[in-house]
Image (cartoon, grey):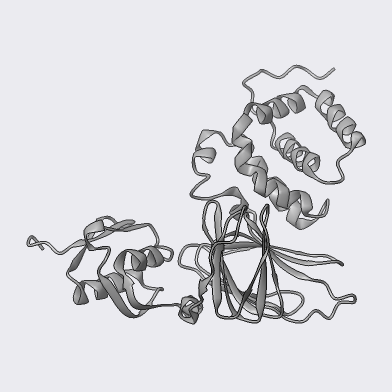
Amino acid sequence: MPAQPAAHAPIPPEVRRQAAAWLVELQSDGAGEQTRLDWQAWRAAHPDHERAWQRIEALGTKLQALQPGLAHAALASAGSPGRRRVVQGLAVALFAGGLAWAAQDRVPWRQWVADRRTGVGERATITLPDGTRVDLNSDSAVDIAFTDTERVLRLAAGEILVATAPDSHTPVRPFFVQTAEGRLQPLGTRFSVRQVARGESAVAVYEGAVRVQPRQGSALVLNAGQQASFTTARVNQPGAADEADTAWVQGMIVAQDMPLGDFIAELARHHPGWLGCAPSVADLKVTGTYPVDDTMKVLDMLTRTLPVQVRLRTRFWASVEPRGEDE
């Protein structure tokens, strides 16, 4: 028998990866009795294996934060590059300790292992295998899963603008965009999808139509010129879509009487660090076209047109506040 490792000894990296792989495998639709028997045999094969699995079980309710990512991973083909990336990222999240869990809200592990991603202040354009064009906004991440039966783009974080292309595959495969809250099926269209916040996504349709299907609620079809947010339970009341909201593709924010608080929230998506707005000036109106590639220049422009000042505490901490007499 192998020697018993000390209880506090580090779990070998390969064992961590294997444990993460088993966690994904047990979530997949194909997991049956034989899978569970193989998993139990793996646990019994070495004390390190059992220690790794006990570490996972000890996480308890923390594992709930990983469920959306686990579901995405389980849908990927066994042995595929996408699943390997997820397993590697999951191994880091499971065994890196408290700091990794504390950072979940700021840098979700699903973003670390996404097929394509952009950093803060970066944008990218990709062309999918079927010719569909996808623009990624700042701090965004997507997974691409094309099979013989469907084309799926999974939004892990941020915002994308999608212009679908006809599928040359036979038979023609439906195209879907999947978020944490539900699934969107475009009907020959151009549309944007944004992960607004935890528990809410938003879609805006500029051409064609999009069928919005929350995970647990009734579906709704949005036509060109409509936008709506949705949760896992329902699609909220549709409103008017504004083409100006896609100006980020050209590296711009277009504002027309936009409340300063909302404007700063948009600009903060492109700013390397924390950027806030004091409530006392949040209702001031902003109008104009502003480049997002130089956020400090935009902030300087605001101080020239509005009664505000920018307070810098560090290079990565800025706040827009009322203009004071001590400037």
Location of residue 241 in the rendering, given as x and y in whole percent from the top left corner: 51, 76
Judge from the rendering whether residue 178 lies leftward or rightward of residue 173; answer left or right: left
Location of residue 202 in the rendering, given as x and y in whole percent from the top left corner: 55, 64
Report the quarter where the N terminus lies: top right
From this viewpoint, which residue is outermost toward the left? Answer: 325
Q: Nearer the viewer, residue 51 or 130?
A: 130
Report the quarter where the C terminus lies: bottom left
Q: Residue at x 76, y 22 (%)?
A: 47
Q: Residue at x 45, y 67 (%)?
A: 121
Residue 205, compared with residue 74, is above or below; it is: below
The answer to whether residue 289 of the structure is visible from this angle is yes
Location of residue 205 in the rendering, given as x and y in whole percent from the top left corner: 59, 76
Location of residue 6 in the rendering, given as x and y in whole percent from the top left corner: 67, 18
Q: Residue at x 81, y 67 (%)?
A: 150
Residue 8, compared with residue 64, is above or below; it is: above
From this viewpoint, which residue is outermost toward the right? Answer: 34
Residue 251, compared with residue 120, is above or below; it is: below
The answer to whether residue 194 of the structure is visible from this angle is no
